[in-house]
Amino acid sequence: MKAVILAGGRGTRISEESQSRPKPMVEIGGRPILWHIMKIYGEAGVTEFIILLGYKGYMIKEYFANYFLHMSDVTIDLATDTTKTLSSKTEPWTVTLLDTGASTMTGGRLLRAKEHIGDDVFSFTYGDGVTDVDIRRVAEFHRESGSIATVTAVQPPGRYGALLMEEDRVQFEEKPRGSSGWVNGGFFVAHPSVLDYIDGDDTVFEGAPLERLSSDGELSAYQHPGFWRGMDTLWDKIYLNELWDNDKAPWKIWNDGLGCEGDDHEYSL
């Protein structure tokens, strides 16, 4: 199963970072959040990625063009201009990088990738959110649902603390999870026919396409009560970095010997 990642937005709400680089390249623990998202998919056995570029997309191209070198120990012979790879920690990924326009909307970006997506069920998400969801479970749920598209529904923590009232006494709960209800957490799994619901570059996928899928009874929701966090603001970036730096990042479900290990799974793609 291929994974498509929307990585072309400007990220205006985190302009402190996105003025100099695309939002998916904002770093968590010294690595772009885009890399973290790909590692989440990699844990589920996904190795083929299609990344949809827009704003400052050349920076993402340059990152992957140099990725093998950055992840390897090498000997460089300056006299002969040759490089010998000693060892590498590069993942077995195939990454297709597509320019989909600086101002193209989310649906339009997906539609532009149609020939690369092919005829099989695929997964897609945004380039700014991390989760501990098992993509294999979402894929399994999608196949059982029989619908065209499945969205991962999440319950982000509330923005404000909650007051639980009992007569004149109150119990305080700091930003309880789920106080804002279930929301679109991305991490979709869909049949390619989902692209038939997209009209063109100006189509916002979260608008008419999702509404039409819903009215046609073709949209399912996989409810994930676990961790999910979007990096919308500078505070979100700081929070995610604190979790990572303290070895408390719930989305680190892969095992590379540097932190928490992922669970064993019985699902396959």
Image: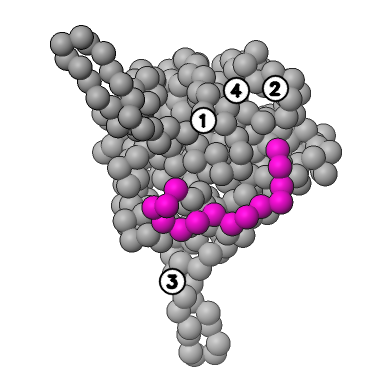
Mark 1 crowd level (few <14, some 14–19, many ≥20, 10 Å Cα): few
How far is mark 1 from mark 2, CA to CA? 28 Å
How far is mark 1 from mark 4, CA to CA? 24 Å
User: Which quadrant of the figure contains the C terminus?
Assistant: top right
The structure residue drawn at horizontal position 56% and vertical position 36%, both measured from the top left corner, is: 125
Judge whether 178 appears above or below 234 on screen.
Answer: below
Indicate the position of residue 243 as horizontal and vertical percent values: 37, 58
Badge 3 marks a residue whose secondary structure is loop
Q: For residue 174, which numbered disc appears in the image?
A: 3
* Residue type at numbered disc 1: Pro
Judge whether 129 appears above or below 67 on screen.
Answer: below
Q: Which residue is mark 1?
A: 92
> First in sequence: mark 1 or mark 2?
1
The structure residue drawn at horizontal position 39% and vertical position 52%, both measured from the top left corner, is: 258
> First in sequence: mark 3 or mark 2?
3
Q: For residue 110, which numbered disc appears in the image?
A: 4
Residues under numbered marks 4 and 2 in contact, where contact means CB atoms less than 8 Å apart = yes
Q: Which residue is mark 2?
A: 195
* Residue type at numbered disc 2: Leu
Magenta stretch in the rendered image: 256-269
